[in-house]
Image: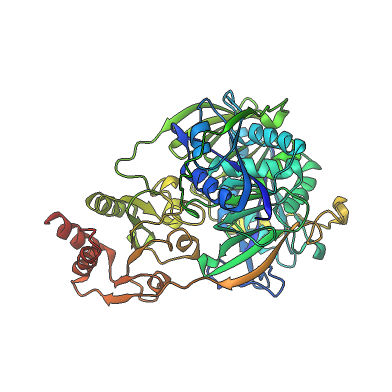
Amino acid sequence: MTLSTLWVVAEPAGDGLSTTSLELLSAARGLATTVAAITWGPGDHAAQAGEYGASTLYSVGDLDGALPGVPVAAALAALVAAGAPDAILVPASYDGRDIAGRLSARLDRPVLTNVTGLADDGGLATEHPIFGGTQVVRARFTAQGPGIVVVRAKSFAAESAGGAPASVQAAPVGELGPEGAARVTASHVEERTGPKLEEAAVVVSGGRGLGEAAAYAMVEELARLLHGAPGASRAIVDAGWVPYAYQVGQTGKTVKPSVYLACGISGATQHMVGMKGSKNIVAVNKDPDAPIFQIADLGIVGDVHKVLPALIEALKSR
Amino acid sequence: MNVVVCVKQIPDPAAPASLDPSFNLDRSGKLILDEADTYGVEMALQLVDAAGGGEVTIVSMGSAADVAGLRTALAMGAAKAVIVSDDGLRGTDALGTAKVLAAVIRRDLPDLVLCATESSDGYTGTLPVQLAELLGLPSITFAKAVRIADGTVRVDRQTEAGYDEVSAPLPAVVTVTAGVVEPRYASFKGIMAAKSKPVEILSVADLGLAGEVGSAGARQAITSVEAAEARQAGEKHVDDGDGAQKIVEFLESLKVL
């Protein structure tokens, strides 16, 4: 290994660390001799961080209602000043992107984003899918590090290494200026029944071809019948039919279910990059030339308003 | 209340995209206003309206050979536009772009800076927060609702689980998700008025940033571009009343049913 140290931003989620954070820890320990993690909030994550490969866990502690971006970047910048790693890996999440952006400007170091692969070629090389995942760009940092790498969910498998708990070290934030003034005043949880979109074995997604917001009910019904999760293309999220949390694609979630059923989705590059890793793809679209058919294992050229009700009936009668 | 909206003119997403020999996105064709930016422009216009005064300024970086995208934002109702256009900016990375935009915005700091969460062509998604850090301002990303009162911006911010209510004192940087508001169509009057609205074109030297930005300032390089492993298209079947049955059979073969 030519990389000596990688740091991973390990984002708290529920009682533990987020799945993407565990994926990054798993990847990091295969690339560098030493892996450290940084986390925040009230939880104790030393055991989990250690299990997935971190020897040290820097803890920023309670953020006192602040959004994580500024305080975590400030703590990281102070740690870098004391001894920089080769690179810092950050999950591509809402808060992860905030941390990466803040840290980049604070350290005057570049960020590589939308990374789906990492390699050691005498330095850290990154892989980025472009144009809907039809091409892969390889890139690397060309100046003094640490480079900041924002990695998409599901790029690596999260695998326990059975490591001992990480040793915890406090990572002080220091005094923040006006940039640290954003405060969370309330949190709202939107209940969704069924499996989470990123974890579902079956994802049923709807797009503009549904014609109207009410038709999305068919997508939800199919997802329920197949014990899966409903998803959406950017077009219908933009149109306000479903919340942003449903969006699959470059801007939204990356999913890799065993079956992805695309209903009335043409297959814009924006969408394909978020779902082309699915094991099996079924597409229903009335346009025989829709790009989605180029990657579908089964393509049905037809009207979603005929095919979906028939499919719902067939599944109900089983 | 004055609002700056950062926008990007991008190649038409409906047209096939390609990289040029130096691995930069080919932008030689017609450029349009990134649809993701229309939400910020609309939000800015509504906030200025609600405040009862002030104006919306569009700030951009890129070639000024074609400013049709900026005119789109002006036709919607923005008062003026500033674009930093310079051959020396080719190959500028996200942080370099943030430095350029910060230099423009710092000349006359507004109450609020709005951006999309990310552009639809490069989709790096870090620029707004880099910009906020360079300007020394708080930032709230992924807004699905924005309200302004008493010098404070209150945002419903998308989270994994739902949303958070987040507030910050002005001035601040906010990124808006698509669908946050319904972007207006420019009226004929708006389109005519946009033709005479000011579009200021600045160079890197005008901003005192020579040597800091452009490919010389970028500290990352693309080493190769390769075709990804292609996914093979499978069976394509024209529905003749049996499409649903085909799907059921396929799911059965996968043992999903």
Place of residue A32 in the rendered image (x, y in percent of width and height, measured from the top left): 63, 50
Place of residue A125 in the rendered image (x, y in percent of width and height, measured from the top left): 65, 60
Front residue of A101/B115: it is A101
Place of residue A49 in the rendered image (x, y in percent of width and height, measured from the top left): 52, 37
- Horizontally, is B142 left or right of A199 in the view? right
- Horizontally, is A17 left or right of A222 in the view? right
Q: Is residue B97 above or below residue B64?
A: above
Residue at 56% in and 44% down: B176
The image quarter containing residue A309 is bottom left
Can residue A50 be seen here? The reply is yes
Residue at 36% in and 73% down: A287
The image quarter containing residue B239 is bottom left
Q: Is residue B22 above or below residue B49?
A: below
Residue at 12% in and 56% down: A318
The image quarter containing residue B149 is top right
Can residue B170 be seen here? The reply is no
Place of residue A247 in the rendered image (x, y in percent of width and height, measured from the top left): 43, 51
Front residue of B228/A146: it is A146
Image quarter hosting the N terminus of chain A: bottom right
Residue at 51% in and 66% down: A133
Report the number of numbered marks: 0
